[in-house]
Image: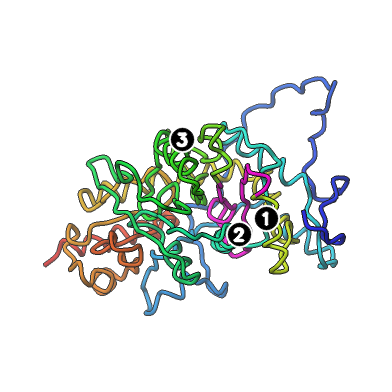
Amino acid sequence: MTENRFQRTDNNFRNLSAVSCSPGSGPGSSPAPAPDPAPAPDFGFDAPFDRTGTGSSKWARATAPGVIPMGLADMDLPGPPAVAEALERRARHRAYGYTVCDPAGRTLVADWYRARHGAEVDPDWVLLLPCGPRTALRLLLETVRPQAPVLFPTPEWGGFAQLCRAMRLAHHELPLHLAPGGYRLPRGPLPRPASAVLLSNPHNPSGRVWPTGTVRGLASWAAESGALLVSDEVHGDLTHPGRAHPVAVTTADPADRPSVVTLNSVGKTFNCSGIPSSFALVPDPGLRARLTDTLAGYGLWEGGLLEQTVQRAALGEGGLWLDALLAHLAAARTRLTDRLGPAVRSAPQASYLLWLDAAALGLPPEDARAALLERCGLEASDGADFGPGGAGSLRLNYALPGPLLDTVLARLDRLDRP
C-alpha cells in the first residue's frame, strides 16, 4: 500500500453503501421459510433501447442515417438496475471528494469468483484499480519493465500491439491455428527469451474460451521462462450456458501462480465501461507492491468514488441481471450463427462477438468492412485491426435488443442477392 496517509486503505474503514448481510442471515439466526418462486424479472432486453443523447462512442460510428453500428464491443442493452440505483443514491449525497479504498471490495471480488466460477481467489491478491483494463495493462508492463520480447497471438485484440508500440517494446505475434472446432493456441514451445505472454481469455475477437489445460500450460511455461502470463479476462463472466471459464491465477499450478496476473473489470460484464475501473488479481506480493508504487507515481490509488459504487452494486446485486443477459446473448448467438453458417470462423463460447470470414459472406476480403456497410447498412470491425491473422475477417457485436437483431438478420439477407 502507498504510504500516503490520506489515500491509505484503513482496515477499519466503513462505508454507508458497503455490502451488508440481509436480515435474518447473521450467525445464530433461524432460516426463513422458503418464499414462493418469483417470476423472472424483465430487464428490457427485448425492447428498443434508445441511446440518443448519451454520447455513445459506438453510435458515433454510424456515419449515415439508418446504419447499425456493430463494431465496438459495447452492448446496446440496458444495464443492471442495481448499478443505476446505486449511482443515484450516491449522487444524492453531495460529497464528491477523494475516497479511500473499501477493503470489503476485495472480499466482494473473491466472493464473486467463488460463486460464479468456483475459483478460490485470495482477497489479498486483489487490487481495485481506478482505471480501465487497458490502462491497468500499461501500468503492469511499466512495472515489469520488459527487456525481452512480449508474446501474444494473432488474431488478437489490437490493444496488445498498440501498447507494445507505444512503449517501444519488442513483441512477437504468434499465429493461431484454425481447426474445425475453433482456434487453437500455437503448438510446441514458445519463442525464448520472452518477458511476458499476453492473452485475452475468452478470446477477442472470436469468443473462444481457452481450455483449462492450455492456460495451465502457458502459466507453467511462463514460470520456467522467467516471464509473466497476463490474462485479460474482461469477457470471462460472459461465458455462455454450459461453458466454464478458467481463471488464470487459480487454474495455474500453485507453484506457478507468482508468474500469473489476471485482469478483469465489471465494465464488459455489466455494460458500464464508460466508468473506467478494473481489478487485478496478483498472487505475487512483491509484484503487487511494485504495481501499487507505479500507480502512485501516476497519482492513482486503489478505490475511487464512482468505481467503487459501480463495482459494489454490480458484483453484490447484479447476478440476476447477468443470468438474464447470458440467456439473451446465447439466443442471439444461435440465431446469427444459424444464419451465417460456414462464414463463422470460430463458434463463440462466450461474450457477444462474432468473427466472420468475409469471403464466405460474398464480400471482398480486402475491403469487406466498406462492402458490408454499403450493402447492408451494418458497421463492423475490420479484421486487420486484430493483427496479421485478422486479414479478410470482420467482427460483429450481437449484444442487441431483440427488435434490432431482427432488423440485422433481415439486412443480412441482402448478401444473398446479386
Hey, what amino acid is under mark 1? Arg
Q: Position of residue 82 (x, y in %)?
A: 67, 50
Question: At numbered mark 1, what does the secondary structure look like: helix, strand or loop?
Answer: helix
Q: Secondary structure at mark 3?
A: loop
Query: Which residues lie in the magenta part?
Result: 261-286
- Residue to which mark 3 is pinned: 244
The residue nearer to you, when weighing 38 against 175, is 175
Rendered location of residue 208, percent (x, y): 37, 45
| N-terminal-most mark, 2 or 3 | 2
Question: Of the residues shown, which amino acid type is indicated by label 3?
Answer: Ala
Residue 120 in the magenta stretch? The answer is: no
Residue at point 75% right, 61% down? 305
Q: Nearer the viewer, mark 2 or mark 3?
A: 2
Residue at position x 33%, y 63% in the image: 387
Q: Residue at x 61, y 32 (%)?
A: 120
Image height check: is 391 above or below 39?
Answer: below
Residue 248 pos. (x, y %): 51, 41
> Distance from label 2 to label 3 (Cα)?
31 Å
- Closer to the N terminus: mark 3 or mark 1? 3
Residue placed under numbered mark 1 in the picture: 290
Q: Which dot, 3 or 1, sits closer to the camera?
A: 1
Q: Residue furthest left?
A: 418
Q: Which residue is mark 2?
A: 143
Kindly indicate the quadrant of the structure image that contains residue 106: top right
Q: Tell me how far mark 1 sits from mark 2, CA to CA.
A: 6 Å
Mark 1 and 2 residues: CB-CB less than 8 Å, in contact?
A: yes
